[in-house]
Image (spheres, rainbow, N blue to C red):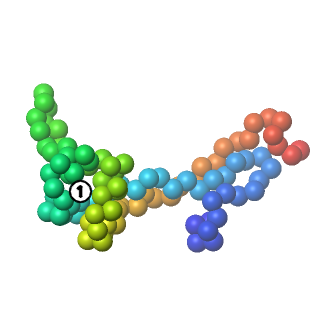
Amino acid sequence: MEAEGMTSLIDDFFTCELVSPSPKYDYGVLAGLKELLPDDIISLAYTPEHAEITQIAAKWDARKFKTFAKYGSEVAAIIEKAIIPGRPYLRIQLKEKGTCRE
């Protein structure tokens, strides 16, 4: 399906869709943004490692750091390089009664 550019199959009894999950990002690569952008901009998307009751790992907020691409091609290249694509999967569900062609 994926090689043919298809995202769904036609079937009388099942809904068949190819689902592509949101990508993950390589935090090691995103660390390069800290060298290119000022702290006030980085702080919009980055939470450094810190301790609460348990150790909290560092994390990046993709909704926010993806907007940093406007700061130049070097920043955009780091963000693009950090993408770890999700693995598509096939979702097959039985159509509800009455929606099938019988």
Residue at the top extreme, as displayed: 53
Q: Residue at x 40, y 56 (%)?
A: 23
Q: Position of residue 28 (x, y in %)?
A: 20, 60
Tell me the residue at 63%/71% (across/down). 4
State which quadrant residue 36 falls in. Answer: bottom left
Front residue of 20 and 16: 20
Whether residue 59 is visible, yes or no, is no
Q: Quadrant of residue 48?
A: top left
- The amino acid type, in three-letter code, at marker 1 is Tyr
Quadrant in the picture for residue 82: bottom left
Q: Is residue 98 above or below residue 89?
A: above
Residue 15 appears in view:
yes
45 sits left or right of 67 in the view: left
Location of residue 39 in the rendering, given as x and y in whole percent from the top left corner: 14, 51
Name the residue beneath numbered marker 1: 27
Quadrant where the N terminus sits is bottom right
